[in-house]
Every structure is written in C-alpha cells, then in structure tokens.
Image (tube, grey):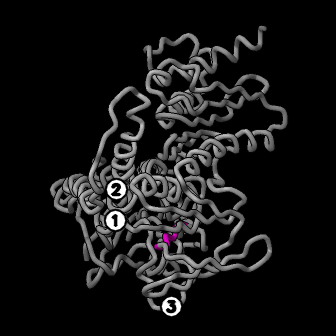
Amino acid sequence: MDHYDIAVIGAGSAGLVAALTANRAGRKVAMVEKNKVGGECTHSGCVPSKTFINCARTFHARKNFPALGLPPVSVGELDFASVMEHVDAVVQGIYAHEQPSVFQSQGIDVFVDSAGARFLSAQEIQVGDRVFQSDYTVICTGSAPQVIPIAGHRMEDILTNESFWRLREQPPEVMFLGGGVIAAELGQSLARLGTQVTIVDLGPRILGVVDDEVAAVAIAALQSEGIRLITSSKVLSCDVRQGGPNTVYVEQNGEKRQFETNARLFAAMGRVPNIAGLDLEKAGIAYDRRGIQTNDYLQTTAPNIYAAGDVTTPFKFTHTASYQANLCIHNILHGNQKQNDLSVLPWAIFMEPEIGHVGLSEAQARNMHGDVRVFKVGTDSVDRFLTESKTTGFMKVVLDESDNILGADAVGAHAGEWIQFVTMAMKHKLPITAFTEMIFAYPSFSEIVQKLFSRYLRSKTA
C-alpha cells in the first residue's frame, strides 16, 4: 500500500496551494481530484466570469463614444458563440498550466477519478480501486451551487455558474434566482450584451452583503441598464417546462405568488459544501450543512486532518482558500502555530462600478463598537476618475475613537485595487498618517485613499 506524508483532497485553489506548498517542503504528496484540476475558479468561477465581464464591458463601452467626443460605432449583430469561445480559450490557456502532468513532473502523485476520494479511516483513503495511507490530509473539496426545488422534466435547463459556460446561443431573457455576486456580475454583463435580465432576491434589496450606501450606487447602476429587480421574494420552487413558459413560485411579504416567464432560470441562491461521498464519519470528522467543522488552526475533529476553502468557511473566495491552504500546511509541518485570522479579509465584486471591501462595514462597526467615526470622499474629487469619465462612486472608512481603521468600503472604477492599501494598513496596524506621508503617483485611481485620510485629518483640526 502506498504511503504519503500529506494527502490533499480536491485540486482547486486551496488544493493546488496545499499540494505545492507541501511538495516544496520536501514532503511526499498525493493530490486527488474528481473533476478537473484547477477547480471552480479556473473552470466555472473567477477565470471565465472575469473574462466574460471584460467582453461585455468592452462591448458596452461603445455606447459612451459620443460623450467622449468620439464618433458612434456601428456594429453588426453580436456573435454570442464567439464570445463564449473566447472565454473558453482563456480558461483552456490557464488550464494548460494546471494539467495533472505539470504537478506530476514536480513529484506530486495526482489521482483524477470521477468517484473522488473517500475515507476508510483517518489514515486510509480510497480513490477508485486504489487505497493509500497518509499521515496527514487536507480536505479542499470546495462547494457547489445550491440546488432549488424543481418540478417538470427539464432540470438541465436551470443554469448555474457551472453550466452557464456551455452556452453558445444567447438567451433572450434570463431570470436570476438570488441577488448576490453572481447575479450582479453576470446579470449586468448579459444585459450589456442584449439579454433581458431579471433578478429575484429574498432580501429587501439585492447584494445584501454590501454596505447600504454602496448597494444604493450598485443598484442604481444595474437599474439604469434595464435590469429588473424583484425583492423580498423567497423562491419556493420552479416548474420548468419544455417550450415554456416557466413558473417560479415565491413567497412575497407573507403571500405566495407565482411568476410566469419565458426566461432561462439561473440558480444563484448561494453555495453548499462538497462533502457528499467523502465518508467523513469513518475518519471521525464532524460536519454539518455549513461544512466541515474546524478549530482556529483549521484542524478537524480528526487531529491529523485539516480543511481549507469553501468546504469549511462562509467566506468563499479564491484568496481565502489559498490563504487557508498555506495555513494548513504550516500547521501540519510546524505544529498548530498560526490561527485562521480572517478579520482583515478584502473582497471585491467585479460589476461596474466595481465594489471593494475590507474589515467591518459601518453597520457592523456600530453594532460592535457603538460610537465610531465615518468619513467619505467621492471619486469625483480625484483627477484620474475625471479624466476617465468614471466619477460615480466613493470611498468610506470607519475608525474607532483612537483613529484605528475598523473597515472600509469602496465603489468605483478599480475599487478592488485601491481597497488593498487599506487592507495592508489594517493588517500591519499602520497609523492613518502613513497614507498622508506617502507619495502617491499622480494621476492615479489610488490617490483617493490619500485624499480620504488627508481630508479626514484636516476635518479634525478645522
């Protein structure tokens, strides 16, 4: 029976980082994947979605030509299939560097089997007909789109972020069931390419995770592009009929209603951890519907088994998965030294205008700290935004009474980039004067960070 120092189950963002880090440390490593190496990020998440967003943004930009003094552009009919082929070409270009052979050449044993891995014990893992032993294991199996109740006989007609990329014919209408990040990003992009888009959400507004003021800007942008929003509507079930129309049953303000629609339905109601079939009980691993339970060191209830990424955290981002994977390997190699600290976790939503966030929102900060200081500056006061004619947006910082940064929210062109300055300051506990004493290149988008803190400090002495 083969024996490994560390086994990694799942070859997505977390799995690749875990396997490579362990391998570089001189450990004998096995990596198991049931689908394709690269996982969701490469094949159905970040890479295809950001490529698709760029295509739609570029296509949409032609509408602004007259406002920039440029002649209007006359274009032919959009070839949706060509767009999707371009998206796939980008995915395959990245996947070329993530083939199993790439990792095998570095000494990592790669097992790709549709059956996946299952535990026989805390030290024994079965993959297909093979069984091997491992001193330690890191579970990085990720998550999948949440399934919605469906009646009728056309379940395959429900789109998800996984199946969407197989489309080659542009749907005239799409209804997103769920108003989170996927609906905002792909919904806006589809609308820009000519699809009629509707977003249905459980909450009183879509993008419930973002700051209220940021959400107002984002929602206004989506509605200005013709996207219809239906809120306070809990999706109960769907009846998908061949030839349509489809029926979506919802509970809205305590009453049951139904929507008849010819739109393709897109399930975007969140994600669930991939734990089925792992036989976690045989390894002594505790879990629930939210995923695998871990301690502060990402160690499961089986002391020699750790978990990272979507399968164990509510913060389902590629960068979270990579961070946690490194943490798992460090704690395996050196004992439980480093805790899973996500208190300074940046994230971005890549719609237009872009959204960036780190730390606590204003509402969270007020709930936790009571009296806080909030300061905001608009993008229309920074020259680079003016030169780009992208003046919609702002940056807002939340500080405690000692001017320690508690969090920041940003909305505007490239907001996900300039939020990183605040992330670094929070992580390394830099004083806010570090921004005012630093020289920022002019004209740059990130100058908004310096302007924000400079104006805040001046406001205190006024």
Magenta residues? 264-268
Q: Which numbered disc covers residue 165?
A: 1
Against 369, is 237 above or below? below
Disc 2 designates what residue? 48
Q: Main secondary structure of the magenta part?
A: strand
Sequence-first tag of 3 and 2: 2
Badge 2 amino acid: Pro
Q: Residue at x 16, y 61 (%)?
A: 101
Query: Relative to the observer, which residue lies in front, 82 or 441?
Result: 82
Q: Residue at x 47, y 27 (%)?
A: 389
Q: Residue at x 42, y 78 (%)?
A: 119
Q: Which numbered disc covers residue 152?
A: 3
Against 458, is 219 above or below? below
Secondary structure at badge 1 equals: helix
Image spot of residue 303 (x, y percent): 52, 64
Q: Residues within 10 Å of mark 3 (few under 14, many from 20)?
A: few
Q: Which numbered disc covers residue 421?
A: none
Residue 58 at least partly seen = yes
Residue 364: which quarter of the image? top right
Q: Residues within 10 Å of mark 1 (few under 14, many from 20)?
A: some
